[in-house]
Image (tube, rainbow, N blue to C red):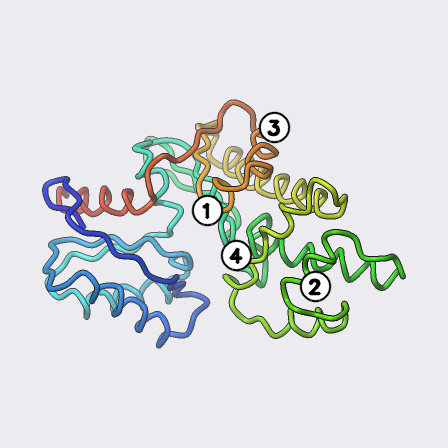
Amino acid sequence: MSVDGRVVGEVEGPGANVATLPPAVVSGRLTALLGGCGPIHPDACCAGSAGAEVPAARLRLEKLLAGLLPRCRISVVHDARLVLAAAQIDEGIALICGTGSVAHGRTADGREARAGGWGWQLGDDGGGAWITREAAREVLRSADAGRPLGELGRRLLAALDARDTMQLLGKLNAIREPMQWAAMANIVFEAADTDAEANGVVLRAASALSALAKSVQQSLGVDGPVVLAGGLLLNQPKLECAVREQLGSLCIRLDEPPVAGAVRLAELELST
């Protein structure tokens, strides 16, 4: 929350992807989040949400926020849009890697393009959930081939308290939320120094992320800058380094939290 450009309050809560989570879950999480702000009457609210590119999901979120914040000017954008706004860049590409992955680009004249962001069940290549899934596939393929478990396999079994790969398979298939999959991605990075399969997953993730940025570059005819963002990309040096090796000097890190972009876009909404 901000008043005249000053931050006057901050609250945090769990994710609320309007495209993948049940409406009741999204409603409950947003109600709790805004309740933590106390009695507020904002003039404008910008919500950046994964899934907002789906028209029905965006409309659902707009209606929900309008009910929670009466007489407030509501705007809903894809969460990737917040990165460029937070970086105060009018032309460039945002490359985000957290639970999922997406690249979003914008030109100075307002043209936009994106690549990825399909959701964890269809894509989100290079994201946290994808990395865990790819690591599990490597371990299970090795088991099918009769090869002994390496460091990656041992760490995955320990993380899920599984006796063997068959029990691992059952426990993984019981996990329904992408954030739970993504939470195990750190296992892959921890094993990457000594396990070839884990290191291979990290390198493939970097290639997948770089491909997203390059796709947007080609679509818009914009080279950069490429703003690196997302909890995984900014907090896993192996992944960031591998991405930078493929994209070169065009990369810069996002120094501000993405929510700063939502504040900036809300302020712009009031000026139009």
Amino acid at the residue labelled 4: Trp
For disc 1, the marked residue is 231
Q: Mark 4 highlights which residue?
A: 118
Q: Earlier in the sequence, mark 2 or mark 4?
A: 4
Pointers 1 and 3 in contact (CB under 8 A)? no
Dot 2 surroundings within 10 Å: few (below 14), some, or many (20 or more)? many
* Badge 4: residue crowd in 10 Å (few <14, some 14–19, many ≥20): some
Sequence-earlier tag: 4 or 1:
4
Q: Is residue 107 above or below residue 67?
A: above
The image's mark for residue 157 is: 2
Q: CA distance from mark 1 to mark 3?
A: 19 Å
Secondary structure of the residue carrying tag 4 is loop
Kindly identify the amino acid type of the residue bearing the numbered disc 2: Leu
**Residue type, label 1:** Gly
Q: Is residue 171 above or below residue 223?
A: below
- Left or right position of 6 against 114: left
Query: Dot 2 lies on which element?
Result: helix
146 horizontally vs 20: left or right: right
Across and down, in percent, residue 103 comes to: 48, 43
Which-is-in-front pick, marks 1 and 3? 1
Q: Earlier in the sequence, mark 4 or mark 3?
A: 4
Discs 3/2, front: 2
Q: Earlier in the sequence, mark 1 or mark 2?
A: 2
